[in-house]
Amino acid sequence: MPESTLKASSKSADEALLREVAELVVSALNLEVSAGDVKPDEPLYGDGLGLDSIDILEIALVVSKRYGLQLRADHEDNHAIFHSLRSLGDHIAAQRTQ
């Protein structure tokens, strides 16, 4: 299995980017929590934020539009990319064009 692009990247998300991504997620999904309540290392799926696969697809769309990067449904690292706010933020920091 190839090394994850998340682990290979030297860029990581700073607190400002994590807050911005949390606000984007909360807004896009109309969540009943504030962006400040989204903990960076909690899982986005299941017991953490409680998102499902449809929610993740919606996040992928808004993140792609906002940061100019391409997130594909068949990407082998999707589980790692969307594991937590921090993993998503790190991926954005490493890949974004905007």
Image: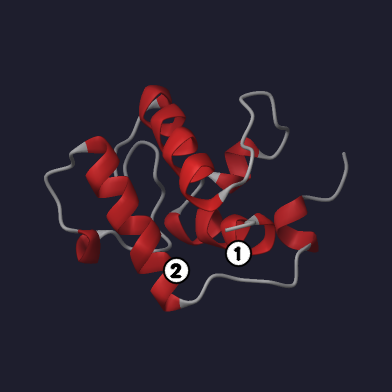
* Residue 55: image location, x then y, percent: 36, 30
In the picture, the disc for residue 19 is none
How is colour applied across the structure in the image? secondary structure
Split into 4 quadrants, where in the image is the C terminus?
bottom right
Q: In the rendering, at what x and y percent does residue 11 appear?
A: 68, 71
The residue indicated by pointer 1 is 93
Q: Residues within 10 Å of mark 2 (few under 14, many from 20)?
A: some
| Camera-side residue of 69 and 83 | 69
- Image quadrant holding the N terminus, namely top right
In the picture, residue 17 is in which quadrant? bottom left
Q: Residue at x 88, y 43 (%)?
A: 2
Residues packed near mark 1 inside 10 Å, few (<14), some (14 to 19) or many (20 plus): some
Q: What amino acid type should be assigned to the residue bearing mark 1? A: Ala
Q: Is residue 24 above or below residue 54?
A: below
Say whether marks 1 and 2 touch (CB < 8 Å): yes
The residue identified by callout 2 is 17
Residue type, label 2: Leu
At a point 40% along the width and 64% down the height, the residue shown is 40
Q: Residue 59 occupies which quadrant of the picture? A: top left
The answer to whether residue 70 is above or below residue 40 is above
Local SS, label 2: helix
Q: Position of residue 50 (x, y in %)?
A: 29, 38
Residue sitting farthest toward the left: 32
Rendering quarter of residue 71: top right
Extreme-bottom residue of the structure:
15
